[in-house]
Amino acid sequence: MLAEQTILRIPGPTPIPPSVNRAMNQPMIGHRDQETKSLLESIKHRLKPIFGTKQEIMVLAGSGTAGLETAVVNTVQPGDEVLVIITGAFGERFAKICQEYNITTHLHDVRWGNAAEAQAVSELLKKHPSIKAVFATYCETSTGVLNPVKDIAEAVHTNSDALFIVDGVSCVGAVETKMDEWGIDVLVTGSQKAMMLPPGLTFIAASNRAWKVIEKNKQPRFYFNLQKYRDNLENNSTPFTPAVSLLFGLEQVLQLLESETLEKVYQRHQVMMNMTRAAFKAMNIPLLTSDPAASPTVTAIKPEDFNPEDLRNIIKQDFKMTVAGGQQHLKGEIFRIGHMGYCSPADVLQSISLIEIGIKKIGKDITLGRGIQAAQEVYIQQL
């Protein structure tokens, strides 16, 4: 292998387009100068279609988890009751943040690999009428599940006055998202997934309903105070030092998304998901999730007759290709392939080919090319 060649196929951080890397290499500018104000003015309007909202989208320097904590501390306070829907490790992270702030947290645990069901959420809200907010994960990265947030939002608003707060970190920008139409009150995403940037930015938007709660919330917060970001954004500024180089990159990302069009971006991710799933079905290697629950951005595979860690090691050794392992109780049980952001069907075909070689090398008897053929057929059929 070439010394500097790497193939990154994890569900974040994801590969960065060359033009975005070039944009981030621009000379530094003053973060309070007019150049930065013009940059923020350009960015703030162009983010809205990705979220499916007319609301302002605040940009914070911080990871996706910073966005999740921001969502919590601005909407609820100690003693409030909340419901957290857990379909994997990142649903659990929302719960841990709430518990850290002494918020009364009801958990709705869903078997990992399954999607949440709106009916179950309705029943829990009827059982706990004092719930102030419901937290959910749109794409659960640890399992490759895409939760039906549109249906869950309807269940929340039909059965309560609670806010519906969504972690969209590993799918916003790659799947259809209609924050306003669906009734999502707070939506969070991060820079290092479908947004094709390095880690370091988190994006968050709030509905009018949410802003009324945020403005009355007495929970102390300083850096994560959304009102500060909203007020500064009116003047095309930020309350604290922005990650200027990442903003340069973000402007170029928005250009790429607009050139491709969001509709085609979403179609591309759907095709890559279908290609990946078809390949492993053709090789008779089980998938963790059902087709209806599957995410277009990451696929989890649960082999029964070989060790996924052996596969990960051999393809890393031979091809410098990295795929993700399992988390928590799924560690050593699954492997996960990211196919989001700066990723195309050609990349999927490469990944499947190298994985087939890896599977063969660790001793599983498969017919080379069977997965590739299935993926190719999906691609051709979906043209």
Image (tube, grey):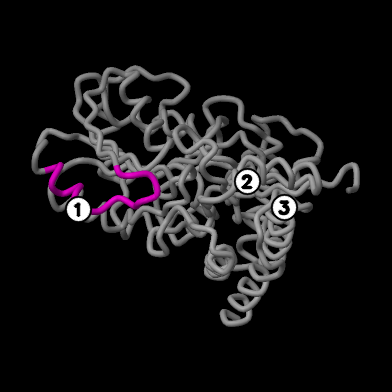
39 left or right of 56 in image? right
State the extent of the magenta-drawn residues as a range. 110-125
Say which residue appears at 61% left-offset and 26% top-offset. 241
Q: On the image, numbered disc 2 is attached to which residue? A: 10
Say which residue appears at 35% left-offset and 51% top-offset. 114
How many residues crowd around disc 3 within 10 Å: few (fewer than 14), some, or many (20 or more)? many
Query: Is 294 drawn above or below residue 139 in the view shown?
Result: below
Q: On the image, numbered disc 1 is attached to which residue? A: 155
Q: Nearer the viewer, mark 2 or mark 1?
A: 2
Mark with earlier residue (3, 2): 2
Question: Was residue 283 drawn as part of the magenta stretch in this picture?
Answer: no
Q: On the image, numbered disc 3 is attached to which residue? A: 358
In which image quadrant can residue 309 be found? Answer: top right
Q: Nearer the viewer, mark 1 or mark 3?
A: 3
Query: Is 96 drawn above or below residue 156 in the view shown?
Result: above
At which x and y percent is residue 40? 59, 43
Mark with earlier residue (2, 1): 2
Say which residue appears at 25% left-offset and 41% top-offset. 163
Q: Amino acid at mark 1?
A: Ala
How far apart are labels 2 and 1 at the CA level? 33 Å
Residue 273 visible in the picture:
no
At which x and y percent is residue 233? 49, 38
Say which residue appears at 81% left-offset and 46% top-offset. 318
SS category of the residue bearing label 2: loop
109 left or right of 204 in image? left
At which x and y percent is residue 1? 88, 48
Which quadrant of the rendered structure holds the C terminus?
bottom right
How far apart are labels 1 and 3 at the CA level? 45 Å
SS category of the residue bearing label 3: helix
Mark with earlier residue (1, 3): 1
Front residue (pair 94, 191) = 94
